[in-house]
Image (cartoon, rainbow, N blue to C red):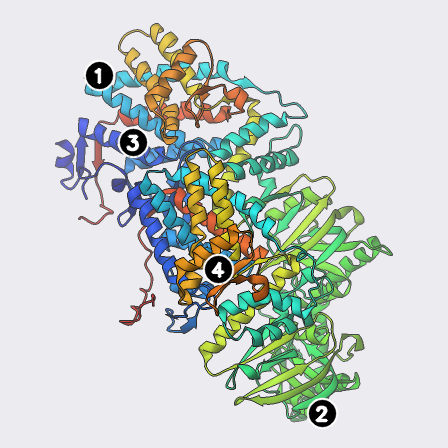
């Protein structure tokens, strides 16, 4: 073979061998992720190199943590990751959809069809499905007051596929409220403004939404207040510690008094800054019971802390940069970079600031703010893997809500869309296509059914029964989804099962693309330095 | 590995060294098995007659204890499913500080029941549904079992505190609870702040001193610091204290300083000005009325000299946290460094500081009888280090119980009375259910029998007899009947005075059920190759972790 002539060490797979390798890899990956789909999917336990445990149902997390090495599987995994990046959900569906496309294609190819023809069919079917999706989606009006119920339904649908029901329902409210909290009219939603904080404490159902901020550190001075009400908050990025000069400087003195003077001089500039803050505190809190809280991004050294503590100021040092932004949004005021012209306008306000100590860890809560434009989801759980699981789910839930607001549309879920699209393809589109590409369209249509099929399989129902009853209902013109408990058709609208429009769009878009690419591979060559040791 | 040989399925896709377990037999049953192994280790330690375990950890440190939290922590469990149980136990330990054994043993028992159900043909998801229903029902039942009137209590009433503390302490140090409980109760009540919910466990310290015996244990209102004072003043009474967080020495600049000297005369003068400066500082302290200087860092030779001259006691406390506690004990405000003026408000007060020699080691005892949110130390004496460690764990459990009862003082009958009652009520509940989950609920109920059974077994009693008579008593309406381990019979716990805290039971059952459901939900395990790094040393032969 030509490559062998050029490089005797190269490994080559050609024609059908290459194709089958790709198909097998896709099917293999599908097999792994299949059992995760839907609310009745099972959990996978991942054990890392250091023995750390991760429990997950989320396709994206799983693909990331599994350390896949097969080149085809990596390609599919990347598509899934892209799916996660754009829509935040539907990774598992993507993988099993691609797997199923490959499986259906394999059948056609085995019957003697050229992959190119199948791919052409896929392309036609894809475009038709996307058009169908536009018609099928349920528009949601997102004016100034979004339909909270609708958002909740979307969030619930996403969360229930990641966590068990009771917890998912609780998180639904949290997620929806937090997105609505940070939402500003006429501006894209920035999910970074929702801080996700975790504490290893109590139970997973104690997770809550804090309208304000939670910082994962406390004040560093024993005499500062642990709990302060009616607080003015100064958000600043000013160094309150002595910094050594960059150049190599030294002091020269000839007696102890001079040295004392030097010590005082060293501190003067820092003390000056601290004094300015204290002056502001005295000005705004004069004669009232109000408290003053300084949250500094830079450091505050012990002498400065001491001065601030004596003045009755609670000071937090080394706050995270992202929290500085959130603080301003949550409490109002502005972040200052210099203490030279401090005015009362720079200050934010919070009704309650308190410290919570958990073992060695300290947390500072900034709560009861006036107009929260940033909030914190405080995740609690008895152990790390529970927290990680909730964290992933919350992330997806937030994205789902955001997508809904931005898409201004949702898609009826529980497999309803897939079955409807399949019927549309088979009954309408296929008849308009000429030639062998019809088979490609048919394959694509059948591949779509994998989603309801897998849902049924994971619930322990009979796959064929379910598909037949679903397609039957659709032929009668009813849009129905699958009831996971009984296996009967249900109306997703009545049950409040809605998927994101963006998720479905991305799924239909990216799945066939990667499947086509893989099908059109006719040679796999591994040359160059072999990274793996020969076995 | 060539491309051709790539196998079908997941195994071919993962990095080498990965393990992949899936399916009911391979994953679920094996997981259950591992958890059962773990719980067989811990269950023999359950209850007052529980056996001790000897655990040698990777640092060759020896532990002799029946405290499950310590055992499972030092066992370094590797199996991922068993680790879930360990984590649940740890969560209980962190949240309540007691009842870790109940979590691990009970979770093991629940999993064993689950295995039987799986073998019967039930799907794990049915079992999970059943168990979840059961735990929700249990919470209701448990609330109903709370002893009436126990929700209000005076946390400063020693008798009531001891009543609630007895069971947890007795389960660690059986036979010695009558000595330990009053000590712990005393210590806790002394430091209990005005608002009991703010009780800080950190304020009850434990000082372990080798030698003597349990009867020499005392509580000291104040602190016991290991080590001697720095200077020659060893005893002082009714004195004011100044606390310096930094060192007691000449001040230094942050930037490197150099002394500039032109002539021999200047050299002489320089030393003199240094001395004058230090003397000025120390004199300021002496003038303020303080008799004791406590330093957080090194004490300079020259400063020490002047301290001696002004008859000041000098104490060095290296740990920042210890220094903070000292401030709390004495009511002093820690100064950053010595200044020329010492504010009288910043001074603290002690009744006495004295260096005492206890059992061959010198300790500094700081006493402060005045109340307030100060610090109390429980002084433990015992003959060996491991006994001391075990006593300390018992004290920790006691203190944690106090903290828990400050927040929620409700109690439920102990000595397995609650468990039997829960089992009975839950069984009744299972009959009202119609689905497949009723089997799971019934099994959940049966699992409770493990506790009286183990208690009886550990005490060398006939378990079956005890359980049947317990059931008989409970169906007769005597719901407070538990096991009297000494008499070997069933008795009303109100005469035995064995009560458990409601919160401990509540959290333990919940954590156990949570962990069990998590283990059952997993159907696939993907393990990556264990990371490199220094290999763990082989344990010496014959030193098995299971006794």
Which secondary structure, mark 1? Answer: loop
CA gap between label 4 and label 1 equals: 64 Å
Q: Is residue A442 left or right of residue B176?
A: left
Which secondary structure, mark 4? Answer: helix
Neighbour tally class for label 2: few under 14, some 14-19, many 20 plus, Cα within 10 Å: some
Residue drawn at (52%, 90%) of the image: B360
CA gap between label 4 and label 2 equals: 52 Å
Up-down relation of residue A41 to residue A131 (above or below): below
Which secondary structure, mark 3? Answer: helix
User: Circle 4 sits on which residue?
Assistant: B100
Q: Is residue B315 left or right of residue B2?
A: right
User: Circle 2 sits on which residue?
Assistant: B311
Tell me the chain of label 3: A
Q: Is residue B516 left or right of residue A216?
A: left
Residue A68 can be seen, yes or no = no
Q: How many marks on residues?
A: 4
CA gap between label 2 and label 3 equals: 84 Å
Mark nearer the N terminus (1 vs 3): 3
CA gap between label 1 and label 2 equals: 103 Å
User: Circle 1 sits on which residue?
Assistant: A113
- Quadrant containing the C terminus of chain B in the rendered view: bottom left
Task: Please identify, in this view, whether the residue under mark 4 or under mark 1 is nearer the observer.
Answer: 4
Residue drawn at (79%, 76%) of the image: B343
């Amino acid at each position: 073979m030509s490559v062998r002539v050029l490089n005797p060490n190269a490994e080559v797979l050609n024609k059908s061998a290459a194709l089958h390798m790709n198909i097998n890899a896709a099917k293999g990956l599908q097999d792994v992720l299949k059992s995760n789909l839907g609310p009745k999917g099972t959990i996978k336990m991942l054990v890392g190199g250091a023995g750390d445990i991760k429990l997950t149902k989320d396709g994206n997390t799983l693909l990331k943590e599994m350390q896949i090495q097969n080149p085809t599987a990596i390609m599919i995994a990347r598509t899934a990751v892209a799916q996660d990046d754009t829509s935040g959900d539907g990774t598992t569906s993507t993988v099993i959809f691609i797997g199923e496309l490959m499986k259906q294609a394999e059948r056609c190819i085995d019957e003697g069809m050229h992959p190119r023809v199948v791919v052409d069919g896929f392309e036609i079917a894809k475009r038709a499905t996307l058009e169908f999706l536009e018609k099928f989606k349920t528009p949601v009006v997102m004016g100034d007051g979004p339909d909270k119920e609708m958002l909740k339904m979307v969030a619930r649908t996403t969360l229930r596929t990641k966590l068990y029901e009771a917890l998912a329902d609780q998180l639904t409210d949290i997620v929806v409220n937090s997105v609505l909290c940070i939402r500003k009219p006429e501006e894209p939603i920035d999910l970074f403004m929702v801080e996700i904080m975790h504490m290893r404490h109590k139970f997973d159902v104690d997770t809550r939404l804090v309208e304000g901020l939670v910082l994962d550190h406390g004040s560093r001075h024993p005499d500062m207040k642990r709990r302060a009400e009616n607080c003015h908050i100064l958000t600043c990025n000013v160094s309150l510690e002595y910094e050594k000069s960059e150049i190599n400087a030294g002091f020269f003195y000839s007696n102890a008094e001079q040295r004392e003077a030097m010590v005082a001089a060293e501190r003067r500039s820092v003390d000056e800054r601290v004094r300015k803050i204290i002056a502001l505190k005295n000005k705004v809190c004069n004669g009232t019971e109000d408290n003053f809280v300084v949250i500094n991004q830079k450091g505050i050294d012990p002498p400065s802390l001491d001065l601030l503590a004596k003045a009755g100021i609670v000071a937090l040092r080394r706050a995270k940069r992202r929290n500085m932004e959130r603080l301003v949004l949550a409490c109002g005021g502005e972040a200052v970079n210099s203490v030279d012209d401090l005015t009362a306008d720079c200050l934010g306000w919070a009704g309650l600031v308190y410290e919570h100590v958990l073992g060695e860890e300290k947390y500072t809560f900034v709560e009861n703010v006036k107009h929260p434009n940033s909030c914190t989801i405080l995740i609690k759980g008895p152990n790390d893997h529970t927290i990680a699981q909730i964290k992933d789910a919350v992330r997806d839930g937030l994205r789902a809500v955001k997508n809904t607001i931005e898409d201004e549309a949702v898609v009826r879920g529980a497999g309803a869309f897939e079955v409807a699209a399949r019927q549309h393809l088979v009954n309408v589109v296929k008849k308009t296509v000429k030639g062998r590409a019809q088979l490609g369209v048919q394959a694509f249509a059948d591949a779509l059914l994998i989603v309801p099929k897998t849902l049924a399989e994971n619930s322990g129902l009979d796959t064929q029964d379910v598909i037949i009853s679903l397609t039957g209902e659709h032929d009668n013109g009813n849009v129905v989804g699958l009831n996971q408990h009984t296996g009967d058709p249900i109306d997703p609208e009545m049950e409040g099962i809605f998927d994101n429009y963006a998720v479905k769009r991305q799924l239909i878009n990216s799945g066939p693309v990667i499947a086509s690419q893989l099908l059109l591979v006719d040679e796999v060559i591994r040359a160059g330095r072999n990274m793996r040791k020969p076995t | 590995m060539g491309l051709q040989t790539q196998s079908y399925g997941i195994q071919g896709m993962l990095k080498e060294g990965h393990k992949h377990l899936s399916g009911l037999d391979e994953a679920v049953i094996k997981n259950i098995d591992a958890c059962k192994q773990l719980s067989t280790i811990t269950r023999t330690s359950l209850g007052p007659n529980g056996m001790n375990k000897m655990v040698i950890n990777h640092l060759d440190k020896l532990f002799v204890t029946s405290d499950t939290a310590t055992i499972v922590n030092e066992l370094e469990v590797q199996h991922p499913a068993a680790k879930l149980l360990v984590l649940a136990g740890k969560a209980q330990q962190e949240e309540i500080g007691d009842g870790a054994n109940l979590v691990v043993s009970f979770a093991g028992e629940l999993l064993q029941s689950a295995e039987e159900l799986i073998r019967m043909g039930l799907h794990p998801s049915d079992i999970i549904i059943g168990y979840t229903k059961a735990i929700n029902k249990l919470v209701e039942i448990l609330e109903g079992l709370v002893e009436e009137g126990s929700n209000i209590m005076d946390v400063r009433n020693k008798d009531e505190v001891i009543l609630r503390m007895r069971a947890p302490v007795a389960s660690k140090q059986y036979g010695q609870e009558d000595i330990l409980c009053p000590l712990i109760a005393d210590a806790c009540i002394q430091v209990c702040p005005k608002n009991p919910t703010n009780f800080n466990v950190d304020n009850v310290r434990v000082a372990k001193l080798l030698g003597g015996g349990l009867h020499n244990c005392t509580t000291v209102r104040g602190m016991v610091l290991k080590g001697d004072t720095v200077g020659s003043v060893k005893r002082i009474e009714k004195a004011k204290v100044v606390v310096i967080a930094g060192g007691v020495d000449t001040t230094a600049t942050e930037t490197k300083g150099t002394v500039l000297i032109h002539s021999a005369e200047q050299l002489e003068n320089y030393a003199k000005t240094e001395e004058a400066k230090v003397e000025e500082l120390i004199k300021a302290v002496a003038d303020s009325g303080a008799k004791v200087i406590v330093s957080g860092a090194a004490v300079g030779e020259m400063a020490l000299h002047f301290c001696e001259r002004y008859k000041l006691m000098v104490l060095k406390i290296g740990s920042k946290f210890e220094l903070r506690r000292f401030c709390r004990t004495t009511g002093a405000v820690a100064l950053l460094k010595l200044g020329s003026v010492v504010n009288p408000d910043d001074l603290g007060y002690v009744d006495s500081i004295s260096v005492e020699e206890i059992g061959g080691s010198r300790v500094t005892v700081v006493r402060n009888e005045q109340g307030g949110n100060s610090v109390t130390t429980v002084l433990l004496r015992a003959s060996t280090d491991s006994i001391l460690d075990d006593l300390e764990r018992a004290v920790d459990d006691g203190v944690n119980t106090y903290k828990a009862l400050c927040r929620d003082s409700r109690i439920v009958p102990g000595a397995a009375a609650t468990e039997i009652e829960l089992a009975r009520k839950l069984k009744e509940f299972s009959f009202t259910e119609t689905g497949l989950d009723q089997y799971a609920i019934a099994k959940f109920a049966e699992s409770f029998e493990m506790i009286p059974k183990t208690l009886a077994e550990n005490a060398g009693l006939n378990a079956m007899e005890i359980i049947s008579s317990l059931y008989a008593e409970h169906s007769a309406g005597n719901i407070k009947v538990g096991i009297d381990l000494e008499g070997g019979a069933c008795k009303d716990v109100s005469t035995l005075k064995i009560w458990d805290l409601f919160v401990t039971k509540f959290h333990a059952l919940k954590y156990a059920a949570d962990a069990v459901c998590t283990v059952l939900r997993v159907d696939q395990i993907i393990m990556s190759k264990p990371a490199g790094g220094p290999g763990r040393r082989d344990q010496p032969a014959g030193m098995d972790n299971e006794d």
